[in-house]
Image: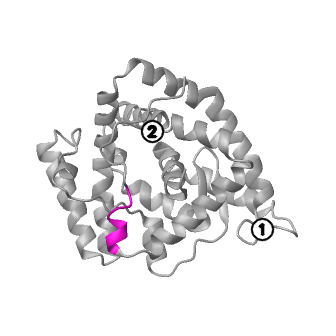
């Protein structure tokens, strides 16, 4: 498994419905500030806290998210799951457009807005990824990468409650990214929460095989996850526009089936 694939898995697994939770972010930072040790890894001075939070997140995943995701794959045809993935990815293209504009990446911004318009109009609201069939590449961006584009360092590695791998920079960007999520503006609240839940379960279902590979292949899953996340987030913030347009290589593909 490449670090790019691993990091995409980690980023996608961060629950979108919780990204705007100021309480979770503040609590994580307060706890993290008390957890650093004298012999800490310079990239991970909060490792004692991070390992504890990782165990908590893994327990929640094992008890709740993974079983629900497996049940979801058993009752939902792959084509339907692909349509769900495409729908939420299409919403993300609009926020990527905003961040590409903020980063002054003209070609990537044009691709993002073109993808959103094409898939929304001709892809039944984004359920079908017509833009990829037309050769319009996805230039996935978020506000954390925008901060990195203008020189803001990633800061220490930080594992957030339920949200998973992050950095101080990405954590600071979470409230802004939350405002860029179009689902946030859906009314009534019941429909909004249903969309959040669908996105979380569908995302976890797409990652069943990858997470199984990680569980069996990594000697220290925590270190592997941390190193992959930090490496690719740094690269993504510094890369050129051409490679950014290839950032989401798996757009429009069928979700992988879980290991039975």
Q: Which residue is mark 2?
A: 203
The quarter of the rendered structure image containing the C terminus is top right
194 vs 225: above or below: above
Residue 149 coordinates in the image, percent (x, y): 44, 77
C-alpha gap between disc 2 and disc 1: 31 Å
Quadrant of the rendered structure where residue 49 is?
bottom right
Q: Which residue is mark 1?
A: 41
Q: Residue sitting at 81 percent across and 61 percent down?
A: 34
Q: Is residue 239 left or right of residue 3?
A: left
Q: Earlier in the sequence, mark 2 or mark 1?
A: 1
Question: Regarding mark 1 in the picture, which secondary structure is present there?
Answer: loop
Quadrant of the rendered structure where residue 229 is?
bottom right
Quadrant of the rendered structure where residue 56 is?
top right
Q: Is residue 42 magenta?
A: no
Question: Regarding mark 2 in the picture, which secondary structure is present there?
Answer: helix
Query: What is the number of the mark on residue 111?
Result: none
Residue density around tag 2, few if under 14, some if 14–19, many if 20 or more, within 10 Å: many
255 vs 222: above or below: above
Residue 243 coordinates in the image, percent (x, y): 36, 69
Residue 151 coordinates in the image, percent (x, y): 50, 81
Residue 111 coordinates in the image, percent (x, y): 22, 64
How many discs appear?
2
Q: Residue sitting at 46 percent across and 37 percent down?
A: 200
Residues in magenta?
A: 241-248
Residue ranking furthest to the top: 75
Given residues 191 and 9, the one toward you in this image is 9
């Amino acid at each position: 498994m490449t670090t790019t694939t691993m990091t995409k898995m980690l980023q996608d697994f961060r629950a979108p419905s919780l990204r705007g939770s100021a309480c979770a972010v503040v609590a994580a930072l307060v706890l993290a500030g008390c957890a650093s040790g004298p012999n800490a890894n310079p990239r991970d001075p909060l490792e004692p806290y991070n390992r504890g939070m990782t165990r908590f997140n893994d327990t929640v995943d094992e008890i709740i998210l993974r079983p629900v995701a497996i049940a979801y794959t058993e009752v939902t045809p792959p084509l339907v799951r692909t349509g769900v993935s495409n729908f939420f990815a299409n919403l993300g293209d609009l926020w990527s457009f905003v961040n590409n504009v903020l980063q002054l990446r003209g070609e990537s911004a044009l691709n993002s807005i073109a993808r959103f318009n094409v898939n929304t109009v001709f892809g039944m609201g984004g359920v079908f990824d017509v833009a990829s069939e037309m050769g319009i590449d996805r230039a996935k961006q978020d506000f954390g990468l925008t901060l990195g584009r203008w020189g803001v360092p990633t800061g220490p590695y930080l594992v957030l409650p339920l949200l998973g791998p992050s950095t101080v920079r990405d954590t600071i960007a979470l409230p802004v990214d939350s405002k860029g999520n179009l689902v946030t503006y859906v009314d009534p609240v019941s429909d909004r929460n249903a969309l959040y839940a669908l996105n979380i379960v569908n995302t976890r279902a797409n990652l069943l095989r990858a997470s199984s590979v990680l569980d069996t292949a990594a000697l220290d899953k925590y270190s592997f996850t941390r190193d992959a996340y930090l490496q690719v987030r740094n690269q993504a913030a510094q890369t050129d526009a051409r490679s950014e347009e290839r950032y989401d290589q798996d757009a429009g593909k069928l979700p992988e089936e879980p290991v039975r």
